[in-house]
């Protein structure tokens, strides 16, 4: 039960003191002159405060009376239950003799109930003070990952901390490097909204620190800029969902297990199609017999084609210049085997592209994904794709087209780049906290397209002809909110006139919240 004796003890003296001050002051009992208008306003304000205090005291008295009534009713109910409990006749004399201890026990029980109630109220107040508050009345959840990566590289790579491919070794470029980063840490927030039209509504936004580096700071490499990863709104009915926002590429739902590469999903540009792009998609799940499920997904996406972005402005990419979105669809079948999902999926993607000067092209891809539990501790998963002009979603090592010459020249021709690739992972789950993974992947633009022009030009400095990656790692969770990981990765990349390789050893520690 709530105890109101302390508020009452402090409230009464305060009110009485204020009333005494008002009654004894001679000026406050007289008519206010115009010259004393400020004093009159102060008196008026003080009287209003006194009235508010009186109302508060009355409310406290009322609540105290209610709590006393509830306490008395609870005592009566406990006594009634005790008196109506069945007692053998032979025990009645003993009960009459021990009436004192029984009453004392009842008092203790009531006191214990009051203490428990006060403790629960205190815990509720603490929870209320520590919860994440939003501007609306709906529940908000904050989560994230603090991730520390320690790495050692041999060879020259595109990104020192999370490499995707290698580049030819330059004269003055170091071939052995060592460093650390926390810019792959993530922050996320979810909001759970009302039910609209029978659908549960929710929203989520996630950030990392992989948006580049501030140029003004001398240590800018260690102060990565905040970057938007995903931001989605969901409307979930029983079997159908509508998702609007920037999200992952739903035609490529799987990713190799790794904490060494999160800013770019692991094996991006090595057969793993990926993109965080604005989209509108619809999903419908059809339940079959024996727990089998069919999932149908379809939607439109921002038609990006892979050109480099600029720091302060956003010109249209070739896909966006076509005046229409990209289109994608996927269907999959899943069931549970050994309490783990077994599934197969097939996807399709299509886009139109306008590269200026009346040079039009089309992009398309077909893809498949699979996830197969093997025995009780092993799992095989992977994806494969075949496409053309899909640099915007990570195909062709990020390249959509090649030019026969200067892209700004009206006489330069273009050619959509055909490519194929995929990746495969074998996972061994030693126990619920420890897993081992081995992955291989490849992205292979067609050499016939690369050599179609005598001196082809791309929108990146180097034209990449093939990219292969392999890795092994372990991921260990000593606790649910702590992870430790170690990984070895080897990369081998072929450019139009060179072959280079590199390797990285990455040690990771992370805290999830």
Image (cartoon, grey):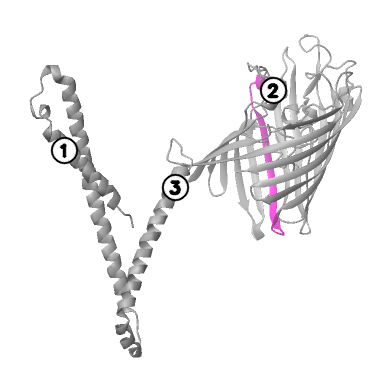
Q: Which quadrant does the N terminus fall into?
A: bottom left
Please name whichever residue, 275 or 452, is drawn nearer the observer in this view of the structure: 275
Marks 3 and 2 sit apart, C-alpha to C-alpha, by: 41 Å
Q: Earlier in the sequence, mark 2 or mark 1?
A: 1
The percent position of residue 444, horizontal first and vertical second, equals 85, 32
Q: Nearer the viewer, residue 479 or 473?
A: 479
Crowding at label 2, few (<14), some or many (≥20) Cα neighbours within 10 Å? few
Is there any visible trace of residue 149 in the rendered image?
yes
Question: Alpha carbon of mark 2 to alpha carbon of mark 1: how far?
Answer: 64 Å
Tell me if 437 is positioned left or right of 323 in this view: right
CA gap between label 3 and label 1 equals 36 Å
Q: Nearer the viewer, mark 2 or mark 1?
A: 1
Q: To which residue does mark 3 refer?
A: 126
For marks 3 and 2 on the same chain, the one whose residue lies earlier in the sequence: 3
Relative to 500, 208 lies left or right:
left
Q: Which mark is residue 219?
A: 2
Residue 454's spot in the image, x, y percent?
90, 16
What residue is drawn where x is 63% and y is 21%? 323
SS at mark 1 in the image? helix
Q: Is residue 226 above or below residue 290?
A: above
Q: Is residue 131 rendered magenta in the image? A: no
Residue at the disc numbered 1: 19
Q: Position of residue 217 (x, y in %)?
A: 66, 19
SS state under label 3: helix
Image point (54%, 49%), residue name? 238
Labels 3 and 1: the sequence-earlier one: 1
């Amino acid at each position: 039960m709530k105890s109101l004796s302390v508020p009452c003890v402090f409230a009464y003296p305060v009110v009485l003191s204020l009333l005494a001050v008002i009654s004894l002051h001679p000026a406050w009992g007289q008519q206010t002159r115009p010259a004393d208008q400020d004093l009159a306003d102060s008196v008026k304000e003080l009287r209003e405060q006194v009235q508010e205090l009186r109302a508060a005291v009355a409310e406290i008295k009322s609540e105290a009376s209610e709590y006393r009534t509830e306490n008395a009713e609870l005592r009566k109910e406990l006594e009634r239950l005790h008196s109506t409990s069945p007692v053998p006749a032979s025990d009645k004399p003993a009960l009459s003799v021990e009436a004192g201890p029984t009453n004392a026990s009842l008092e203790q029980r009531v006191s214990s109930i009051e203490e428990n109630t006060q403790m629960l109220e205190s815990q509720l107040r603490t929870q209320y003070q520590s919860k994440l508050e939003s501007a609306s009345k709906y529940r908000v959840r904050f989560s994230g990952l603090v991730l520390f990566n320690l790495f050692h590289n041999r060879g020259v790579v595109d990104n020192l901390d999370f490499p995707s491919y290698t580049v030819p070794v330059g004269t003055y470029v170091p071939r052995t490097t060592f460093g650390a980063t926390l810019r792959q840490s993530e922050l996320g927030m979810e909001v759970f909204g009302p039910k609209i039209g029978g659908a549960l509504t929710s929203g989520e936004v996630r950030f990392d620190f992989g948006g580049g580096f501030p140029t003004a700071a001398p240590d800018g490499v260690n102060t990565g800029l905040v970057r938007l990863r995903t931001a989605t709104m969901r409307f979930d009915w029983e079997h159908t969902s509508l998702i609007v926002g920037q999200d992952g590429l739903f035609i490529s739902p799987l990713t190799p297990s790794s904490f060494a590469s999160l800013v770019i999903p692991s094996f991006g540009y090595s057969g793993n199609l990926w993109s965080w792009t604005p989209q509108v998609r619809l999903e419908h799940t059809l339940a079959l017999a024996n727990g089998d499920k069919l999932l149908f997904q379809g939607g439109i996406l921002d038609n990006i084609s892979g050109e480099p972005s600029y720091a302060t402005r956003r010109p249209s990419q070739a896909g966006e210049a076509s005046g229409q979105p990209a289109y994608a669809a996927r269907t999959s079948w899943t069931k549970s085997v050994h309490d783990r999902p077994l599934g197969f999926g097939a996807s399709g993607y299509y886009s139109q592209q306008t590269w200026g000067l009346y040079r039009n092209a089309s992009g398309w891809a077909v893809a498949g994904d699979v996830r197969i539990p093997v025995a009780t501790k092993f799992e095989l998963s992977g994806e494969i794709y075949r496409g053309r002009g899909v640099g915007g979603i990570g195909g062709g090592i990020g390249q959509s087209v090649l030019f026969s010459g200067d892209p700004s020249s009206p006489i330069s021709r273009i050619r959509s780049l055909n490519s194929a690739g995929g990746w495969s992972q074998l996972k061994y789950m030693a126990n619920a906290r420890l897993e081992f993974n081995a992955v291989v992947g490849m992205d292979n633009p067609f050499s016939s397209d690369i050599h179609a022009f005598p001196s082809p030009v791309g929108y990146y400095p180097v034209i990449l002809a093939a990219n292969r990656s392999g890795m092994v790692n372990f991921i260990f969770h000593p606790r649910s909110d702590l992870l430790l990981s170690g990984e070895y990765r080897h990369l081998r990349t072929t450019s139009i006139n060179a072959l280079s390789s590199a390797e990285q050893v990455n040690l990771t520690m992370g805290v999830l919240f």
